[in-house]
Amino acid sequence: MKILTIMGSPRKGGNSDLLLDAFLAGAGEGGAFREKIAVCDLKISPCTECLACETTGECVIGDDMGEVYRQLIEADRVVIASPIFFYGLPGQLKALIDRCQALWYRNREESDGTGERKRSGFALLVGATRGKNLFTGSLLTVRYFLDTLPARLEGSLVYREIEEKGAILSRPDALEEAMKAGRTFAGGGGPRTSTGTSTIL
Ligand SMILES: Cc1cc2nc3c(=O)[nH]c(=O)nc-3n(C[C@H](O)[C@H](O)[C@H](O)COP(=O)(O)O)c2cc1C
C-alpha cells in the first residue's frame, strides 16, 4: 500500500511538518510504503482556468505538478498536513489542489459518483486561534480535493492554539494522537472522524 503525504506549510520543521512526522511514524509500523512531499520544495503555478483539461484530462502547464499527478494517481491513501492561513489553506497548497481540476475532469464519472471509494484520505490541520469555524473551510477543501482522485476523507485531526514554530511539541497528546491515527489509517481505515479536539465532517 502506498501512502502519499503532502506537507502544505511553507515552514519546514513547523507544526504541520512535526504532526505529519508523528502520523508517518505510526503509519510506518505496519510497513506501508510512505512518501512525503513538501509543497514548499515544488514550483507549482496556479490554475489559469484555460480548461484545456476539460477535454483531455491533462494540464498544459509544465512544472513540478507533473510529478505530483503521477504520485497522486499511484497512491492508495493521501494525507494533507497544513496550517490555517486566513481561515483557508496556504496559497502554495491551494495551487496544488486547484491544479487537480485536471484529475477531476479525468475521473469525472467516478468523482461525481456516490459509490464506495477504495481510496481514502486524512487531514492534519493546525491553527493559532480558537475560532469555532477555524477548520471548516479547509476541511471542505480537502474533502473535495480528495473527490478528484477519487478518495473519501477518512478522518481528520485539528489543533487550535498552536502558533510558534514547534509549539506542537508541547502537546505530546497531539503527537501521540497523530501517531495512533497514522497506525489506524495505514491499517485500513478507522473511524470516519478521529479527533479528540474537534472537526466538522
Ligand atoms: C499568513 C498567515 C496566516 C495565518 N492565518 C491564520 C488564521 O486565519 N487563523 C489562525 O488560527 N492561525 C493563522 N495563522 C497561524 C498559523 O496557522 C499557525 O502559526 C500554525 O501553527 C503554523 O503552522 P506551521 O508551523 O505548520 O506553518 C496564520 C499564519 C500565517 C503565517
Image (cartoon, helix red, strand yellow):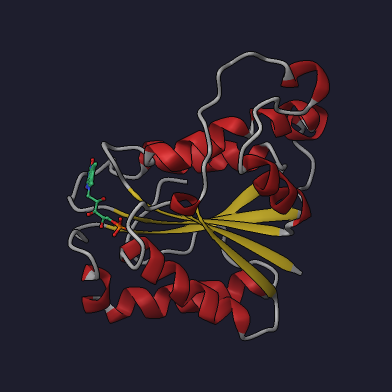
Q: Quick check: 162 left or right of 91?
A: left
Q: Is residue 140 visible?
A: no
Q: Is residue 99 visible?
A: yes
Residue furthest to the top in view is 50
Write the residue at 45% across / 67% down: 20
Write the residue at 67% across / 15% down: 51
Percent position of residue 69, x then y: 70, 44
Percent position of residue 145, x then y: 58, 38
Residue furthest to the bottom in view is 29
- Compared to residue 140, the image places residue 81 above or below, namely below
Q: Quick check: 172 left or right of 105?
A: left
Percent position of residue 195, x then y: 41, 64
Write the residue at 77% across / 55% down: 74
Residue 186 lies in what quarter of the image? bottom right
Quick one: 47 or 27, which is closer to the camera? 47
- Compared to residue 51, the image places residue 97 above or below, namely below
- Compared to residue 2, the image places residue 179 above or below, namely below
